[in-house]
């Protein structure tokens, strides 16, 4: 484990630690949420405050939000405070780490458990995700949820839910809460995943912000930039 920042002294949890914590919550039937903060989330929180709207790129629409949106800022900060573990950018070459540190200072954020914000890829590539899902009842949430229906053969897929943008979070949560016969939710929905996962944890479920790992599984022949470019073009953002 390493230290996230010398000033804040937040300890980074290892992938093995995260996996063990997920298993413990699963076996005990406790809710647990893992969310990840990256470039999109930091800009969404900081917009019209720490950064200007000029620093907001068009691709943020692909991530499921439309800015400016003060309410979104409040929702993201609430989710960060509620989540059980948070993936933060920590590599030195992540240009948005300094902005995240500004956010932490400005809003007085404190974290008990943090990890690398690429924890989704680490869990998947190291085999922990498949081990966690084996024999478990799962749901998949996000734009590619239906396409991913056959991608987790070791698990028992209960349902898939589309979540194209932040405007759909409340309705999707209500639909999921009506049918609670699942144990793990895999959420691949961009920035809305950060808001939805802590909500699902309150149902005593495991909620994982899986992000672009699902894209890698469903469309392994296409890069994130290709997928983003295609979506932006289809939706008249290019």
Image (cartoon, rainbow, N blue to C red):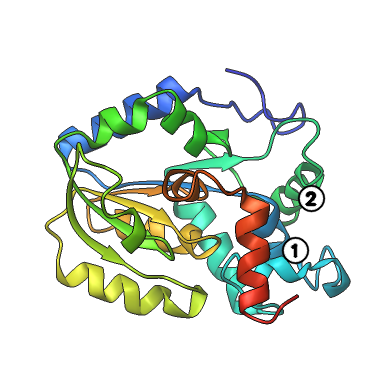
Count of number-bearing discs: 2
| Residue positioned 41% across, 73% down in the render | 169
- The image shows residue 133, relative to residue 209, as above or below, that is above
Q: Is residue 219 left or right of residue 7?
A: left
Q: Is residue 116 left or right of residue 183?
A: right
Contact flag, marks 2 and 1 (Cβ < 8 Å): yes
Image quadrant holding the C terminus, namely bottom right
Image quadrant holding the N terminus, namely top right
SS of the residue at dot 2?
Answer: helix
Where residue 119 appears, as percent x and y from the top left, is 51, 34
The residue under label 1 is 46
Where residue 30 appears, as percent x and y from the top left, is 22, 43
Where residue 51 appears, as percent x and y from the top left, is 84, 65
Q: Residues within 10 Å of mark 1 (few under 14, many from 20)?
A: many
Q: Is residue 44 left or right of residue 56?
A: left
Residue 61 shows up from this direction: no
Where residue 123 appears, as percent x and y from the top left, is 43, 31
- The image shows residue 182, relative to residue 230, as above or below, that is above
Question: Which quadrant would residue 188 be assigned to in this image?
Answer: bottom left
SS of the residue at dot 1?
Answer: helix
Pick the residue in front: 215 or 53: 215
Question: Which quadrant would residue 199 be assigned to in this image?
Answer: bottom left
Residue 4 shows up from this direction: yes
| Residue positioned 73% across, 53% down in the render | 103
The residue under label 2 is 99
Residue at the extreme top of the image, as rendered = 1
- Cα–Cα span, label 2 and label 1: 8 Å
Instruction: Give the mark nearer the N terminus: 2 vs 1.
Output: 1
Q: Residues within 10 Å of mark 2 (few under 14, many from 20)?
A: some
């Amino acid at each position: 484990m390493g230290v996230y920042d010398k000033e804040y002294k937040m300890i980074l949890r290892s992938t093995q630690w995260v996996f063990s914590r997920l298993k413990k919550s699963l076996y005990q039937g406790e809710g647990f949420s893992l969310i990840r903060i990256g470039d999109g989330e930091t800009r969404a929180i900081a917009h019209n405050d720490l950064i200007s709207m000029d620093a907001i790129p068009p691709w943020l629409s692909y991530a499921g939000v439309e800015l400016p949106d003060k309410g979104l800022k409040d929702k993201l900060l609430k989710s960060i405070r509620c989540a059980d573990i948070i993936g933060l950018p920590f590599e030195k070459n992540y240009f948005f780490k300094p902005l995240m540190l500004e956010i932490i200072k400005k809003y007085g954020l404190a974290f008990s458990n943090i990890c690398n914000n690429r924890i989704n890829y680490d869990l998947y590539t190291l085999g922990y995700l498949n081990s966690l899902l084996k024999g478990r009842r799962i749901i998949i949430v996000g734009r590619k949820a239906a396409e991913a229906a056959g991608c987790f053969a070791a698990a028992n897929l209960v349902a898939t839910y589309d979540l194209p943008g932040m405007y759909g979070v409340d309705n999707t949560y209500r639909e999921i809460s009506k049918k609670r016969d699942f144990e793990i939710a895999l959420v691949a929905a961009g920035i809305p995943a950060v808001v939805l996962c802590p909500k699902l944890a309150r149902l005593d479920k495991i909620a994982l912000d899986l992000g672009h790992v699902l894209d890698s599984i469903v469309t392994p022949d296409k890069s994130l930039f290709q997928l983003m470019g295609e979506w932006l073009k289809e939706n008249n953002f290019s």
